[in-house]
Image (cartoon, rainbow, N blue to C red):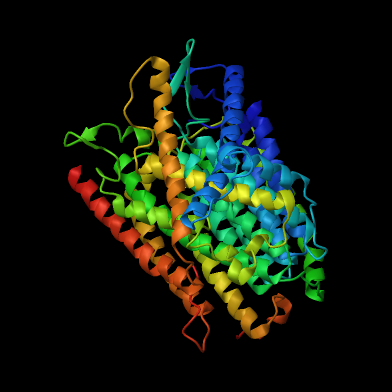
Amino acid sequence: MTHLIIFLFFGGLCVAGAVNLLVQRHPINSALSLVVVMGSLAVEYLLLGAEFVAAVQVIVYAGAIMVLFVFVIMLLNAGEEERTKGSRVAMLFGIPGMLVGSVLVGWVLIERTGTQTVSAGALPGAPRTIGWLLFHNFLLPFEVTSILVLIAIMGAVVLASHPDSDQGKKES
Amino acid sequence: MTAGGTPPLLGNRTLNLTTFIVVSVIKTVLALFVLLTAVAYTVWLERKVVGHIQNRWGPTRVGPFGLLQPLADGVKFLFKEDLTPPHVYKPLYIAAPMIAVAFALTSIAVIPVGNSITIGHLVIPLQITDVNIGLLIILGVTSLGVYGVALAGWSSNSKYSLLGGLRASAQMISYEISLGLSLVGVLMLTGSFSLRDIVNAQSGTFWGFIPRWNIFYGGQFIAFFIYLMSAYAETNRIPFDLPEAETELVAGYHTEYSAMKFAMFFMAEYANMITVAAVASLLFLGGWHGPVFGPPLLRALLPVLWFVLRIFGFLFVYIWVRGTLPRFRYDQLMAFGWKFLLPLAIANLMITALVVALRA
Amino acid sequence: MVPISYYLILSGILFACGVTGFLIKRNIISIFMSIELMLNGVNLSFVAFAAQWHALSGQIFVFFVMVVAAAEAAVGLAIIIAVYRTRETLNVDQVDLLKL
């Protein structure tokens, strides 16, 4: 019962944050509602037993990636977005399409997996087991992503640096 | 710990939910009270020590040695007029100090201050909750603390505040990396994220007399200094207090704040200092280990005293550094973090990994 | 006990919100955030499936998604800064020349 209440509370927070992201005109409000979504998702991960994933979600997503977003919004002093013609067309087709799609997916999910339940802390993803898996079964993907990150760092530095100066190279 | 519904372990006994909640609430209230008092008196300590370093007396008027000064300050903050400048973005302007102080106070929840005390047949660990990802929670919560500073700077809608907020977010992201990497060495030596396990692994001595603290036994003294320097940058303290450099930015991100909102930023900064000091002593200096003797109650409380003394030592060093060092320039700060601390942290990590692998 | 489908529906809602945001938002940063929202929705379904089939690899995939998201955020935000520097706008409708 407590499990369900916690799930519903943070699930509701998630959905509210996601909808708020759509409704808000100013990017910094959208960014903050996305932080709320990520924080409540971390709680959902905890409910599913994925402790390490929850911690990494907070540290990497909410604590690093979103801070980078907020930083760029502050740096570029992004204002309220203006609505243009293209966006109204997208709204006209996007929202009904999304509603139909989500109802369809929800119906299929309830039909197919309706009986299966999951208890709190179902599959404990302790740091030790996760680390063991990461460095044994998934060693090659791990190394490949490290190369990906290296390329991303170099790309970010090259893109963000001023073309006519050698100063101003700071990106993570 | 398993999250959610299963009754959490308290000591070695599984308790029913009511007892658990009652004990937890009592511990939380106590911890918050102690933390807030400590924050107030750290401010007093800072004013006193910096005063003596600069050949002044510091606060002397309120109470003996100015000991009641924090109280007077608190009353002043409460009764001052709370100005809201007309050009601010109000929702975030009001939320920012709350975010800062909330995240600063949250991390106390996983910090253990001692072994455990026994009341009747109830074994109560001196820690609000012992989770197996304790250190990660502290890292996560402190990395969220940057939002308070960044949003304060942005929502104030003033150029000084904006520059302060920008500097703060860039600085905190940059130094978080070396901070995290400096802790990984300790984690490899212990093999656990639980702060209690990390402290327990540091008990005893080697070669007869040297305590088995990570800074000696694990050879983590380079990591210790990397941690200390990154932590100074994370808490925006001199010599890295660029976000609030008063010679350039008036007061940085809290230029537009007054009264209690300003005090909340202050509380957040000092609470973060205490958290950093606590983590440093838990991870590198053996936590609460020290000579223990006497009757059972003294045996339970002496470790707490040793732990508090370590934190006090760190706070003193903080203040000492503030009284001694000048401020960095911003490009120097970034170069120091990325070009010096980060490679050093990685080198330390690799050497530690090699040592751990050879020992195993 | 919560049915596993609840988690999947939540992840579906988040993903749908991300798609909608991607379509209706005109600010390039907001569009980018909608993509992050979609990734988050997918992550939740990964963890839920991991719990359903008792396979920890589902949680491992989340790490890879996070790494890719971090790399994407770094490069994407750098591109946004570069675009803003030359165009002085963040509205995607005005960034239509296919060159900087």
Image quarter (top left, top right, bottom left or bottom right) of the C terminus of chain B: top left
- Percent position of residue C53, x then y: 49, 37
Which residue is depicted at the point 47% across and 44% down? B136
Please tell me in which quadrant of the rendered image residue A10 appears.
Answer: top right
How many numbered marks, from 0 up?
A: 0
Q: Residue at x 33, y 53 (%)?
A: B223
Residue B253 position by quadrant: bottom right
Left or right of C73 in this view: A112: right
Image check: A87 left or right of B295? right
Q: Is residue B280 left or right of residue A88?
A: left
Q: Does A119 sit above or below residue A151?
A: above
Choose top left, top right, bottom left or bottom right for residue B290.
top left
Q: As drawn, which residue projects farthest toward the left?
A: B207
Q: Where does residue C9 sit, x and y in percent of width and height?
A: 67, 44
Residue extending farthest to the top is: B120
Residue B199 visible in the shown view: yes
Give the residue at x 74% y 57%: B93
Is B340 located above or below residue C65 in the figure? below
What is the x, y in percent for residue B306? 39, 33
